[in-house]
Amino acid sequence: MKYIDEFREGRLARQIAANIMIEADSRRHYHFMEFCGGHTHAISRFGIVDLLPGNVHMIHGPGCPVCILPIGRVETAIQLTQIPKVILCSYGDLLRIPVRNGMSLIKAKAQGADVRMVYSCIDALKIAQDNPQHQVVFFAIGFETTTPPTAVAIQQARMLGLNNFSVFCNHVLTPSAISHILQSPEVREFGLVQLDGFVGPAHVSVVIGSRPYEYFAEEFQKSVVIAGFEPLDVMQAILMLIRQVNSGRAEVENEFTRAVMPDGNLKAQSLVAEVFELRRNFEWRGLGWVPYSALKIKSTYGDFDAERRFPIAECSIDDNKACECGAILRGVKQPRDCKIFGTVCTPENPIGSCMVSSEGACAAYYRYGRFRANNPMTAENSCQQSI
Amino acid sequence: MCLAVPARIEQLIGDNHAIVNLGGIRKEVSLALVENVVVDDYVIVHVGFALQKLDQEEAEQTLALFAEISKMDDL
Ligand code: SF4
């Protein structure tokens, strides 16, 4: 068992696709949102949409951490790099997010700012140890999966007595974003976005468990099936959602039992609770200001909070007018609805954040879906691709 | 950046770290977020941390589920 190839097998993919065909009721439509960018990526890369009947619709959700980061926060990060002796460490995807006037962290770096790409927050910690004369700031982003590692880094910095390491915290919370979508006028009042259920996040759920979703099932009567990131996981989850809808159930089910427990990873949760607390309000690209949807560093760890250490003002910048990322992140539009998709805006020259990260809907469409209309993939070849 | 991957633990090294094998590439990861990990366990690796141990029995059950054939009379 290697936990990868087994979950990509073409024969089983056709089997699940056949089950979906049999069980999806042709007299109705099904609308499911995959919250997570990882699922958006898998759906595009393995051509899963091609294996679904026309009445099963997948809507992309806002679960790509790079895509939902508002431009103002990137601008703040760029301003941090202008402070003398600051080294800004960041995950690679963030470097290319365009801010305004064509500026980005990578351009700031080209102009002399000390911006370093790291794979892990622990790398940022090492850079701080190696550069005692500099202030090292880690640009922390991500959902519940990247938050526990940041908590570990902050605790280690304290243990090591590092006074030149701090974190610019942009960690956000999945359940608040799902609530916000369910309460949005597009879903509630206008019916612009129809939602029968969610494909629940894979690795976020590894950390928070399956229980936090019970609220959505009960309160909003939506089905939730937590799914792994491999193509067969996603397809099986879609089949399980169809079964729930057919039998009028709205429950939380777990397809990813090999990694997700009902309570999640308690060790990770307690570390997060030790270091972080809720932020009263946080701006999301596409969703606007969402109350209690993000975390900040507790005052007991305030020495490691870049927002306390450096005089930085909060700033809010509007998206490029042509960019539809906001509507795409709310599930109202598709990448192809954007007039500059694939022409002006490409992965090489991204105008909006959805084209920057490979988990962004626009980047996934561009890479895997652009020519699909004239080159349909079959179950076999679409599910046997590998990295 | 959320694309975390399953990897096999090859070697436990000091300081709560381990070497994992990621499709042929050896990489050091932190075990600060997991407990009772031993060599040959598979873990989900994300931004340099093992996030969770994978459960082989559950994985086999899920694979068996994929192979089930819909019976129309169950509907
Ligand atoms: S194609 Fe580019 S500009 Fe258009 S919505 Fe996507 S990211 Fe924004």
Image: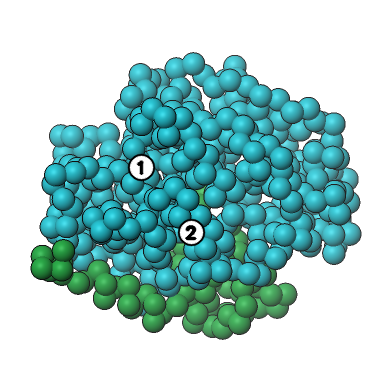
Q: Residue A265 in the image: state x and y as whole percent.
A: 59, 68
Q: How many residues crowd around disc 1 within 10 Å: few (fewer than 14), some, or many (20 or more)?
A: many
Question: A13 or A105: which is nearer to us?
Answer: A13
Q: Quadrant of residue A157?
A: bottom right
Q: Colour of chain B?
A: green
In this view, A181 is above or below A45: above
In this view, A273 is above or below A31: below
Marked residue chain, label 1: A
Which label is found at residue B21?
none
- Residue identified by numbered label 2: A214
- Residue identified by numbered label 1: A195
In this view, A266 is above or below A306: below
Which residue is found at the position 39% from the left and 77% from the top? Answer: B58
Side of A88 where A286 appears, left or right: left
Question: A214 or B8: which is nearer to us?
Answer: A214
Which residue is found at the position 37% from the left and 75% from the top? Answer: B59
Which chain is rendered cyan in the image?
A
Side of A117 where A219 appears, left or right: left
Which quadrant: the C terminus of chain A?
Answer: bottom left
Q: Earlier in the sequence, mark 2 or mark 1?
A: 1
Which residue is found at the position 34% from the left and 38% from the top? Answer: A194
Mark 1: secondary structure:
loop
Q: Residue A68 in the image: state x and y as whole percent.
A: 54, 37
Res. A175 in view:
yes
Which quadrant: the N terminus of chain A?
Answer: bottom left
How far apart are labels 2 and 1 at the CA level? 16 Å
Q: Quadrant of residue A110?
A: top right
Marked residue chain, label 2: A
Mark 2: secondary structure:
helix
